[in-house]
Image (spheres, grey):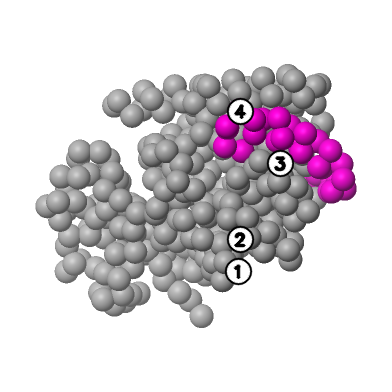
């Protein structure tokens, strides 16, 4: 059965947003710093308009009730005004940067690998924090397309010593893992966030995260890293991702994980081709219907390389472009390799 849903469009920001929201020309998007003037109606099974039809939030007489009754449209629009609580009580910022610390020998981006010594790794993590990262995300297993799963013992031998040492510096640490035993070991070592690309597929994961009252990042992925890029299929990729994340979030809450401790991540590059990724990036505002803060991790990914014909080492401009494009749609958390450069770009953007 087809289901119709709404995506906010024509976004406005800052003082302009506050003014237009106050006079009723715009509606708030996840608070009052961003507003939207129009919205698009899409169908769950397909994109049924080759040219999107946009409806003004103010002119209800123009709304096409063939797809949704006006009452349902109004109720759906109200959902987007919800402002999520501060994630884990982190200091209030317009955007939080999560610095990537790879402890794998087979990362897709060679310059991000930190396997020479723990001392150098800790030094790099501290530098990222001082450059503006709110969180350092530490991973010991590559999840690039085609990556082979490693043993839990090997994963923990890479990440736990670094987490233990870095936690002495009072830096918020996230552990990128899909294994519950690594989750517990990382929490014991000082991690306060679990970044789980499998979205709690390990049966013990939710229990561990709930019991320890730590943060959780729920990511969408079709398949597993070893096979996720083999002909991924969707009816409507944006709707399918939101539905998946909604189900996983509800499951997490049912298992005792606090809603304010959850971030959602659409998983750019995980079980999606370029057209899937681009559509989801265009439709990012849809994710605000889930009433959680959004994290985007698109840094130096292959979609940039295919579009611009560049190697991972040459993809910084594309990465910053995707970061800004995400923030424009209300994304609050960015997972990046290049903290200093991203921070500078955001600082300038915020002044415009």
- Mark 1: few/some/many CA within 10 Å (<14, 14-19, 20+): some
- The residue that disc 3 covers is 189
Magenta stretch, main secondary structure class: helix
Is 170 a magenta residue?
yes
Residue at 65% in and 42% down: 191
Looking at the image, residue 256 lies above or below residue 12: below
Q: From mark 2 to mark 4, how far is it between C-alphas?
A: 25 Å
Please report whichever mark, 3 or 4, sits nearer to the chain's N-terminal start: 4
- The residue that disc 4 covers is 169
CB under 8 Å between callouts 1 and 3? no
Position of 301 compared to 35: left or right? Answer: right
Give the numbered dot on residue 273.
none
Q: Position of residue 138 (x, y in %)?
A: 68, 37
Q: In this orientation, does residue 135 appear?
A: yes
- Mark 3: few/some/many CA within 10 Å (<14, 14-19, 20+): many
Which quarter of the picture shows residue 34? top left
Residue at 81% in and 36% down: 158
> The residue tagged with tag 2: helix, strand or loop?
helix
Please report whichever mark, 1 or 2, sits nearer to the chain's N-terminal start: 2
Position of 208 compared to 61: left or right? Answer: right
- Of residues 25 and 311, which is closer to you in this image? 25
Looking at the image, residue 8 lies above or below residue 19: below
Looking at the image, residue 28 lies above or below residue 49: above
CB under 8 Å between callouts 1 and 2? yes
Please report whichever mark, 2 or 4, sits nearer to the chain's N-terminal start: 4
Which quarter of the picture shows residue 144? top right
Please report whichever mark, 1 or 3, sits nearer to the chain's N-terminal start: 3
Residue at 33% in and 29% down: 350
Q: Position of residue 212 (x, y in %)?
A: 63, 55
> The residue tagged with tag 1: helix, strand or loop?
loop
- The residue that disc 1 covers is 255
Q: Write the start and end of the magenta stretch as one range.
A: 145-173
């Amino acid at each position: 059965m087809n289901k119709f849903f709404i995506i906010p469009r024509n976004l406005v920001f800052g003082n302009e947003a506050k003014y237009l929201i106050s006079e009723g020309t715009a509606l708030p998007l996840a608070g009052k710093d961003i507003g939207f003037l129009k919205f698009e109606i899409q169908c769950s099974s397909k994109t049924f308009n080759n040219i999107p039809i946009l409806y003004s939030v103010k002119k209800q007489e123009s709304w096409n009730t063939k797809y949704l009754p006006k009452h349902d449209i109004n109720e759906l629009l109200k959902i987007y005004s919800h402002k999520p609580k501060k994630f884990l009580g982190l200091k209030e910022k317009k955007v939080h940067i999560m610095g990537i610390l790879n402890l794998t020998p087979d990362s897709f981006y060679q310059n991000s690998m930190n396997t020479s010594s723990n001392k150098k790794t800790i030094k790099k993590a501290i530098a990222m924090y001082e450059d503006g990262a709110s969180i350092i995300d530490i991973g010991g297993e590559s999840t690039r397309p085609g990556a082979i799963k490693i043993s839990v013992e090997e994963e923990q031998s890479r990440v736990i010593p670094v987490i233990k040492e870095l936690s002495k510096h009072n830096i918020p640490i996230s552990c990128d893992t899909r294994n519950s035993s690594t989750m517990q070991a990382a929490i014991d070592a000082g991690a306060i966030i679990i970044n789980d690309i499998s979205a709690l597929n390990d049966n013990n994961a939710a229990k561990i995260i709930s019991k320890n009252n730590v943060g959780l990042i729920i990511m969408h992925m079709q398949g597993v890293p070893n096979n996720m890029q083999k002909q991924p299929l969707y009816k409507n990729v944006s709707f399918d991702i939101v539905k998946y994340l909604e189900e996983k979030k509800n499951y997490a809450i049912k298992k005792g994980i606090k809603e304010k401790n959850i971030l959602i991540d659409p998983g750019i590059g995980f079980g999606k081709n370029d057209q899937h990724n681009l559509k989801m990036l265009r439709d990012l505002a849809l994710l605000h219907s889930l009433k959680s803060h959004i994290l985007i991790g698109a840094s130096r990914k292959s979609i940039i390389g295919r579009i611009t014909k560049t190697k991972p080492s040459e993809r910084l401009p594309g990465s910053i472009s995707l970061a800004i494009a995400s923030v424009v749609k209300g994304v609050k958390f960015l997972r990046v390799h290049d903290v200093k450069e991203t921070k500078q770009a955001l600082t300038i953007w915020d002044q415009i």
